[in-house]
């Protein structure tokens, strides 16, 4: 499916989606509450068939926390990038996509571990890279650790 | 006060017990800990615990310049260091829209493939060792040594090269390079037959690997299992074909695919990939054009504001780098989508209801490199 | 016959008589036993150390390596140095282990292999004790070792050890059958279980040739089964270091580990010498019927050379297996025994009995 059709299709599913400028991928900023609807449609609909989540990234933009999903379809060869953002730095929370793409399991655990973003519905949300008793979320921009991080 | 996140209470059926495979265990090849729930010898459940050598490479990247980041990527998948470096270089070159000289593309492709062969040879060695065939280990390492010698001659390092820089190479290759690579190819063609003789055709090996740890194509896609492990399930996921970079669109090579999805097919994909890699090198080695070994680059690289994604085919699968830049000399966010991290996720799924010995074979066939998981 | 020049009977008997003349019978017996015990202890140590060295050299040869080459000429003293190191190492006490069983286990393993040597004839008249049920005795005694292995695994308070021990138990009990039945095939042919007579009967031809195809099949099965019984690769599931770290002896250190290590090599020596004795004519020289000159030359090679040569050949075969094959899985191991070796063995015995009945053997 070419990008224009794909844009129309996504805007049809989620009219609130904002398209962002990006040279590589078709990028949309999605309201967090619509994430579940959109991803389910992207995965399940035969003409979209986004069956491969090849990257899931947690990002701290300074004021906002968010997650970037890179999706592609192995059969139809089209890709899309989805972003969700939230201002809530205390208890950021998004819906999980583990039920659609199992590969999100480890990715989401990593994002929880390093950014402290919760994923509702994740079957086993624990820290994955850091110790269980680690305090704080090191990949956040406002994370400080006088002992382990040497500022130059 | 420390915030303690409790482990979920693991339900244990009667007659089940846990063993901890790792962090120090001969078959995890590093510090990976697998908490295996067993019933007798049968694996009922498996929980990977990683992070024992988490160095926070992604966090360090946020403070580093792009040239420095290259040195960090070596330390992720140390067995395919060139390919990791290549990914960063391609990302920077793509963002700056720099055209690298032809010579660089040729040399990078050859080195990538040599690195892939070396990585697969080490994998083959340890795979044989995990199955109890200790002789394989010495055969594989003996042949890998030749590649490392070639590397050493050209840029002085054997494992962590950091040879690629944005825009080109650190310096030109050694004048002997072409001859030595050709000698190696001739040598290795003979030795790969040895691999088949000692392991691939062995009855015990076939019994141990066929039908063990079957991963269907749908599952492989859903779990994102890329690289030889994914291609062993019949999923054409080779980045070199899908999104060609360097010289891969100019050379002819076959994307090795097998459809059984078991340990044996993952094994055979890697063995055949070594042959394909040698084919690629053979097509390029005689035609390396003369020219500069690097494009003109500014000493301080600032990527234009925006976000970039670059993927390459490392020896273990798709290595993706997602980078957000705000126009400064260091990135806002650098995410490495490392293949081993993703491939580890499927281990629990395909090793259930198998024996401990099978778990070792499956783990070895996924070719996990622990620093690549932990970053 | 010519090989009588190497008869040790008069030598051993003269010692025996002299002792009984000098001392009362009880003390004579005691002194005799002590001498034999000391001789075997020394022999045991030398063979064990030599086998460890040989294994390392053979394995190095198979793997394009040099092997030990630093301590002494060609590294011959390497194993002795290693042994001294093991002697001096700390014995680690394992928390919550069953201390008594944990300490007994290595001795059981080593005593079992020690007992088996007693019945093996090294040359004519050179054996500690010549049972009339020698083969049965050896089968019985070698299988005692598994008790030690099971105890070691059980008492170590380590799950890897336990799994290794359970595997080993299942494995040895299964393969015992094949070892016994393949030896039984030869007993049918020989009509005796006495080792000296079994060897004596092979003066006209080794049993592996005498017994036609069934004897050869029995030999192959014995090789496979005895490799499995000694817990060696490709059947080293009990130790399987890539799966179970070191299996049943994971928690052992120092001299206790050395006992397990030595016992493994001694067991290998014992099964190899049984194979040599029962199938390859023991200390009997190689004869070809009708070639008188050749046979005489062969007779002048001392029986000890024949005996150790044959044993070394079988040991070398077992090392070859170990360093070329990957390891089996536990269910495949049991399948091999119960579905293949055992039925083949049973049929083999019938064929052998039929051949003996019809008098078709040489």
Image: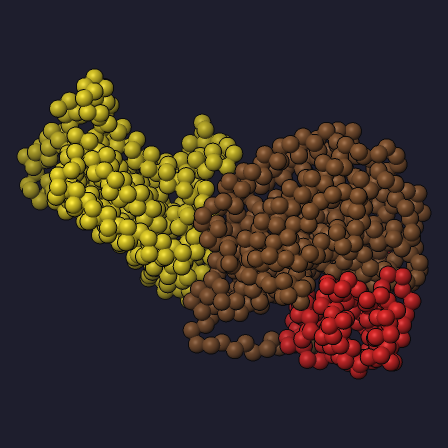
Q: Residue at point 88% right, 41% down?
A: B101
How is the protein colored in the picture? Answer: by chain
Q: Position of residue C21 (x, y in %)?
A: 5, 34
In the rendering, what colour is chain A?
red
Q: Is residue C297 above or below residue C173?
A: above
Q: Would residue B110 be seen by someone viewing this image from the given angle?
A: yes
Q: Is residue B273 above or below residue C249?
A: above
The quarter of the picture where the C terminus of chain C appears is: top left
Q: Is residue A23 left or right of residue C183?
A: right
* Chain colored yellow: C
Q: Position of residue B212 (x, y in %)?
A: 51, 59
Q: Position of residue C111 (x, y in %)?
A: 27, 50
Q: Nearer the viewer, residue B249 or B316?
A: B249
Q: Among all residues in the image, which is located at the extreme top?
A: C293
Q: Residue at point 10% right, 32% down?
A: C13
In the rendering, what colour is chain B?
brown
Q: Position of residue A21 (x, y in %)?
A: 92, 67
Q: Is residue B179 left or right of residue C61?
A: right
Q: Nearer the viewer, residue C115 or A64?
A: A64
């Amino acid at each position: 499916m070419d990008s224009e059709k794909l844009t129309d299709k996504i805007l049809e599913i989620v009219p609130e989606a904002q398209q962002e400028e990006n040279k590589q991928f078709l990028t949309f900023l999605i309201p967090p509450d619509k994430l579940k609807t959109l991803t389910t449609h992207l995965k399940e609909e035969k003409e979209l068939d986004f069956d491969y989540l090849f990257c899931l990234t947690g990002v701290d933009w300074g004021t906002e926390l968010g997650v970037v999903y890179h999706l592609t379809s192995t059969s139809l060869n089209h890709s899309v990038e989805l972003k969700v953002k939230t201002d809530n730095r205390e208890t950021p929370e998004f819906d999980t996509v583990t039920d659609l793409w199992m590969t999100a399991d480890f990715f989401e655990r990593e994002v929880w571990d390093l950014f402290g973003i919760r994923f509702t519905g994740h079957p086993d949300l624990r820290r994955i890279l850091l110790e269980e008793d680690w305090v704080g979320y090191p990949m956040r921009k406002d994370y400080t650790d006088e002992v382990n991080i040497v500022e130059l | 006060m420390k915030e303690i996140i409790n482990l979920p209470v693991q339900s244990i059926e009667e007659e089940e017990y846990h063993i901890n495979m790792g962090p120090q265990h001969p078959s995890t090849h590093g510090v990976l800990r697998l908490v295996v729930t067993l019933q007798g010898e049968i694996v009922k459940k498996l929980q990977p615990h990683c992070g024992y050598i988490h160095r926070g490479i992604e966090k360090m990247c946020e403070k580093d310049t792009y040239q420095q980041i290259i040195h960090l990527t070596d330390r992720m998948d140390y067995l395919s260091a060139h390919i990791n470096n290549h990914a960063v270089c391609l990302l920077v070159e793509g963002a700056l829209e720099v055209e690298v000289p032809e010579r660089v593309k040729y040399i990078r492709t050859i080195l990538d493939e040599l690195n892939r062969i070396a990585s697969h040879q080490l994998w083959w060695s340890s795979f044989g060792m995990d199955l109890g065939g200790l002789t394989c280990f010495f055969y594989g390492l003996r042949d890998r040594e030749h590649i490392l010698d070639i590397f050493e001659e050209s840029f002085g390092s054997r494992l962590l090269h950091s040879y690629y820089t944005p825009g080109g190479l650190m310096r030109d290759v050694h004048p002997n390079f072409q001859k030595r690579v050709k000698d190696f190819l001739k040598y290795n063609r003979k030795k790969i037959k040895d691999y088949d003789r000692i392991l691939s055709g062995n009855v015990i090996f076939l019994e141990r690997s066929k039908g063990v740890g079957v991963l269907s194509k749908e599952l492989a896609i859903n779990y994102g299992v890329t690289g030889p492990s994914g291609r062993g399930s019949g999923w054409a996921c080779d980045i070199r074909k899908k999104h060609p970079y360097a010289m891969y669109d100019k050379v002819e090579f076959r994307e090795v695919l097998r459809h059984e999805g078991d340990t044996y097919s993952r094994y055979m994909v890697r063995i055949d990939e070594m042959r394909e890699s040698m084919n690629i090198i053979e097509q390029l080695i005689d035609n390396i054009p003369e020219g500069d070994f690097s494009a003109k680059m500014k000493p301080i690289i600032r990527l234009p504001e925006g976000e970039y994604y670059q993927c390459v085919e490392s020896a273990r699968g798709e290595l993706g780098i997602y980078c957000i830049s705000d126009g400064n000399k260091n990135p806002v966010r650098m995410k490495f989508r490392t293949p081993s991290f993703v491939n580890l996720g499927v281990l629990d799924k395909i090793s259930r209801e198998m024996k401990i010995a099978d778990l070792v074979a499956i783990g070895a066939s996924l070719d996990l490199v622990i620093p690549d998981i932990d970053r | 016959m010519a090989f009588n020049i190497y008869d040790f009977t008069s030598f051993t008997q003269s010692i025996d008589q002299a002792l009984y003349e000098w001392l009362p019978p009880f003390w004579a017996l005691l002194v005799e036993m002590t001498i034999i015990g000391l001789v075997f202890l020394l022999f045991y140590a030398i063979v064990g150390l030599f086998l460890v060295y040989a294994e390392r050299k053979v394995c190095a040869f198979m793997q394009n390596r040099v092997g030990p080459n630093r301590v002494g000429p060609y590294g011959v003293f390497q194993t002795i140095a290693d042994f001294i190191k093991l002697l001096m190492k700390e014995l680690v006490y394992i928390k919550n282990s069953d201390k008594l069983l944990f300490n007994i286990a290595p001795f059981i393993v080593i005593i079992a292999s020690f007992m088996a040597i007693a019945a093996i004839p090294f040359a004519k008249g050179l054996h500690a004790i010549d049972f009339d049920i020698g083969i049965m005795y050896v089968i019985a005694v070698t299988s005692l070792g598994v008790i030690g292995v099971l105890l070691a695994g059980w008492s170590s308070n380590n799950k890897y050890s336990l799994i290794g021990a359970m595997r080993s138990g299942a494995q040895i009990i299964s393969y015992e059958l094949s070892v016994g039945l393949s030896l039984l095939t030869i007993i049918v042919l020989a009509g005796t279980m006495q080792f000296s007579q079994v060897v004596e009967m092979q003066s006209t031809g080794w049993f592996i040739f005498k017994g036609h195809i069934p004897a050869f099949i029995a030999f192959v099965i014995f090789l496979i089964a005895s490799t499995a019984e000694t817990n060696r690769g490709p059947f080293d599931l009990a130790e399987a270091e890539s799966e179970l770290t070191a299996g049943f002896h994971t928690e052992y250190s120092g001299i206790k580990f050395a006992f397990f290590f030595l016992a493994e090599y001694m067991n290998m020596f014992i099964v190899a010498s049984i194979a040599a004795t029962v199938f390859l004519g023991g200390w009997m020289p190689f004869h070809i019927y009708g070639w008188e000159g050749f046979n005489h030359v062969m007779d002048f090679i001392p029986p000890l050379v024949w005996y150790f040569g044959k044993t070394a050949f079988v040991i070398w075969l077992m090392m070859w297996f170990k360093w070329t094959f990957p390891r089996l899985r536990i269910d495949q191991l049991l399948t091999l025994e119960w579905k293949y070796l055992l039925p083949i063995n049973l049929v083999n015995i019938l064929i052998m009995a039929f051949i003996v009945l019809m008098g078709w053997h040489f």
